[in-house]
Image (cartoon, helix red, strand yellow):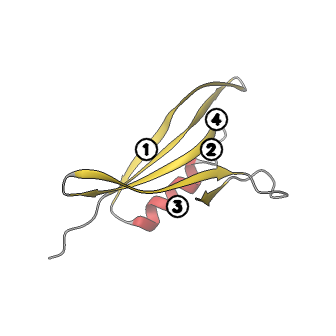
């Protein structure tokens, strides 16, 4: 039987308290067994109203170690009613 991959996503940015930003921190992270669920989860997290995300890091667990997989920026496209999206770099 094929072993399931484990994926991890981390959203980095600033928390907004009373509309004012605080320090830059790792806001949320999640563990997944499906890559598509991980990407959809990250898209939903960057659009929460109490955070200002900068970037999202994606990892895969191989041989007991977390290996960097991809990085995406959280951007607001022009004319899109301020809904953030992931821009892959």
Q: Disc 3 on helix, strand or loop?
A: helix
Q: Disc 4 on helix, strand or loop?
A: loop
- Mark 4 residue crowding within 10 angstroms, few (<14) / some (14–19) / many (20+): some
Q: Residue at x 52, y 54 (%)?
A: 42
Q: Which mark is residue 75?
A: none
- The image quarter in which residue 86 lies: bottom right
Q: Residue furthest bottom?
A: 1
Identify the residue under disc 4.
Answer: 50
Q: Residue furthest front?
A: 89
Identify the residue under disc 2.
Answer: 48
Percent of width and height locating residue 24: 56, 29
- The image quarter in which residue 19 lies: top right
- Mark 1 residue crowding within 10 angstroms, few (<14) / some (14–19) / many (20+): some
Quarter of the image with the N terminus in it: bottom left
Q: Of label 3 and label 2, which has the lower sequence position?
A: 3
Distance (Cα) linking label 1 and label 3: 13 Å
């Amino acid at each position: 039987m094929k072993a399931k991959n484990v994926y991890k996503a981390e959203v980095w940015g600033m928390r907004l308290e009373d509309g004012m930003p605080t320090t830059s921190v790792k806001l949320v992270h999640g563990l997944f067994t499906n890559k598509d669920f991980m990407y959809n989860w990250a898209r939903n997290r960057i659009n929460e109203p109490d955070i200002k995300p900068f970037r999202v890091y994606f990892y895969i667990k191989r041989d007991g170690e977390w290996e960097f997989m991809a990085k995406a920026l959280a951007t607001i496209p022009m004319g899109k009613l301020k809904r953030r999206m992931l821009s892959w770099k």
